[in-house]
Image (cartoon, grey):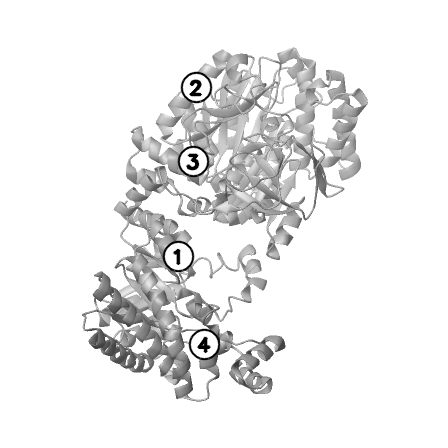
Amino acid sequence: MAGKYVYFFGNGQAEGKAEMKNLLGGKGANLAEMTAIGLPVPPGFTITTEVCTYYYANNRSYPPTLAAEVADNLKKVEALMGRTFGDRNNPLLVSVRSGARASMPGMMDTILNLGLNDETVQGIIAQSGDERFAYDAYRRFVQMYSDVVMGMDKDLLEHLLEQKKEEKGVHLDTDLTAADWKELVGKFKAKIRETLGKEFPEDPQEQLWGAVGAVFGSWMNQRAITYRRLNNIPADWGTAVNVQSMVYGNMGNDCATGVAFTRDPSTGENYFYGEYLVNAQGEDVVAGIRTPQPINRANSKDTTLPAMEDVLPECYQQLVQIRGILEKHYRDMQDIEFTIEKGKLFMLQTRNGKRTAKAAIKIAVDMVREGLIDEKTAVLRVSPSQLDQLLHPSLDPKAQKRVIAKGLPASPGAASGEVVFTADEAEAAARLGLKVILVRVETSPEDIHGMHAAQGILTARGGMTSHAAVVARGMGKCCVAGCGDIKVDYAGSQFATAKGQVVKKGDVITLDGSTGEVMLGEVPTVPPQLTGDFGTLMEWVDRFRKLKVRTNADTPNDSRVAREFGAEGIGLCRTEHMFFEADRIAAVREMILAEDVEGRKKALAKILPMQKGDFVGIFREMKGLPVTIRLLDPPLHEFLPHEDKDIDALAKTMGVTPQSLRAKVDYLHEFNPMLGHRGCRLGLTFPEIYDMQVQAIMEAACELTKNEGFSIVPEIMIPLVGVVTELARLRENTVRVCEEVVAAYGVKVEYLIGTMIELPRAALTADEIAREAEFFSFGTNDLTQTTFGLSRDDAGKFLPFYVETGLLEDDPFVSLDQNGVGLLVKMAVEKGRATRPGIKLGICGEHGGDPSSVIFCHQIGLDYVSCSPFRVPIARLAAAHAALEEGK
């Protein structure tokens, strides 16, 4: 099929199939597949993603053979429909839609009713016998085409429509007459001519190629670029274009259009879930302009609205049958679009439905029980990044709540924040670290950046399948949609509730996306409960993964939480966090400010029992699982006060002059502390600090071994090693203290001594360092900083620009830079194992909880990753994905 750019589907025959979504896009591949399995799909053809690639590589031009292929396939559609494109008496109208290989709901452009002009509209009147329908379709086409293709400000035409409704004293579009629509078409065209200085095109061929170019062009519009960046969709994939004969849901009361999911996309419950509108076109449902109605009575949120199963019972039953066919065929929950024209059902789309994490897990587990998929497929169905939705707190059911409004529970979860009314405001506030709730009458694809920045989304209009609901579920954002209890006043930067409560920009509200409640103020939350289907899925996850998952934890409580999330040990315990506790900071400062070794030892003796108590609690919680403890890492000045009032207070406590204390603080100040007197450099110049910490670790281990029967193997980690001689000397000191403690307690406790690889030189000389280290833990936070020459604390000022403009694919502090930093890690793994084949290897930077970084760690053969407690399940699932993908 070399050089073939157009694929036909219709009348039960299709040149494409579902497996060809890389070429045909998701929509085109599934239209072909539905046609082939006998579902009622209006005929059409798909222009492939290769044309999109060609289009951008060749100055927005097309392959030479494309026009002929389009013309040939258009004739096939004409033959099946018995109508001719552009014919004034018996015209064929088409839709032109985008279709990327990955679902991008609402991000690219669509044009309906294409082929209409002042002549063909008469043919549509003759075909339908309905002048009102014909001019309604015509004005829709003019509105969409002028916006998408010609760049007209759509609000200008919308304003003319609202003016007409006010003039006629009506509220709904459906209340306008044929004469009203005919008049509006003329006004629309005049406004386009006045604004753009050119005529609306009458030639259907010009319309068609204008629409095709606009859809390809929309691949690079800002909202599509933003969506791709947020969802890691490569720009070089491109989009296909689908040209399909029109069917009409707006020809009368025996017509309808709708969107449905074969299961509930919010909860995963196995019931048919969807919305429809009588006498409407598809955009009416998702835009939220009219309140959609439920397709069935079961689980309907509003029993006053007539359900499709009552209004169009035969079509509903046919749709129920198609639901079953699609789920069995695709073996996944489907998101479908349909239109009913004069009592006849047509399928316009099916795709794997966007779903929340809760729904993804339930659907995966249920489908295993139903025999549709196996456990491996179920594990792969749930995205590791999705789990983040489940691992955050929900509203405390015991907390007092002041509910001021209620809408539809469109995307679950809880969110609190300051109210803002525009996407730009949301993004600007998020940059300042503020938490916001984006409040809109209804969202549009242009709001994508603000939706991403906000904690949650509240809309006054729109249903459970509206743009806000679908996109929020895909993002994992809490969303309350269709909240008719509020009236949004953009000009006044406020909204009012039905009860008269006024909420202004900056006021704090809380959303409950599981109930649809809107509450004034911030409502307390409770930790997540990860049981039931989640527990079942994680059992399967643990069966398939090879990589161990530990946690970064510094307290007994963090250790307990991590164990509950499935952590298999601690990969990083930061001992300096213990130094900051209020009951010990004075002793730490006394140690730092001491004039000699004896003074430091005296102060350290006060800290020793406190540190030992911490380690006893952590060892006890981990119940014999491995615990890696990093000795003191940050520079000493971080523990000292810097404000004058704090220095004065400490000087008084210590009985020294403020001047002498300030001089000491100034002496310890470093211009670049990240590269200064910290880590093992501190341990070498002040060995008594590390000696105290090692003593505390070993005494805790010995006591629990002797008194409580624990089997503990502490892993003592020496940070910031750059040359092997540093580690050799500190290892000697560490062994000495360990052996002294073990001898004093008279028990046998094994221990490991290793290092954190966080400097490029350490990675490059890992074969030498492995002579002295029994384990490596890769500190990828600092390794990223020192490899890139970036300060993580300052890079936030410009790194977002690097990511947004494509200079970097990802923020290297979020997702491991595999080609640079990752190469150093891989080299250190190979060098370390060459010297010490049994060396234990792990990663403990923030990357340990990033799914793509976890997969990389599996691929290079690490033994474990370590991450924050709440990301342990994410790392477990990512590790299982890595093992299963490797086994394919």
Q: Who's the residue at 33% across and 79% down the image?
A: 691
Residue type, numbered disc 1: Asn
The front one of 733 and 521 is 521
Q: CA distance from mark 1 to mark 4?
A: 23 Å
Work out whether mark 3 precedes mark 4 in sequence or the reverse, and give the earlier one: 3
Name the spot of residue 700 as percent of width and height, x first.
Answer: 29, 68
Examine the image and state in which quarter residue 781 appears: bottom left
Q: Who's the residue at 66% across and 32% down the image?
A: 145
Residue type, numbered disc 2: Val
* Circles 3 and 4 in contact, beta carbons < 8 Å: no
Examine the image and state in which quarter residue 376 appears: top left
Residue type, numbered disc 4: Val
Numbered disc 4: secondary structure: helix
Residue corresponding to mark 3: 359
Residue corresponding to mark 1: 557
Q: Nearer the viewer, mark 1 or mark 3?
A: 1
Work out whether mark 1 precedes mark 4 in sequence or the reverse, and give the earlier one: 1
717 relative to 148, above or below: below
Residue corresponding to mark 2: 320
Asked if residue 734 shows in the view, the reply is: yes
Name the spot of residue 140 as percent of width and height, x first.
Answer: 67, 26
Residue type, numbered disc 3: Ala
Work out whether mark 1 precedes mark 3 in sequence or the reverse, and give the earlier one: 3
Q: Is residue 276 left or right of residue 570?
A: right
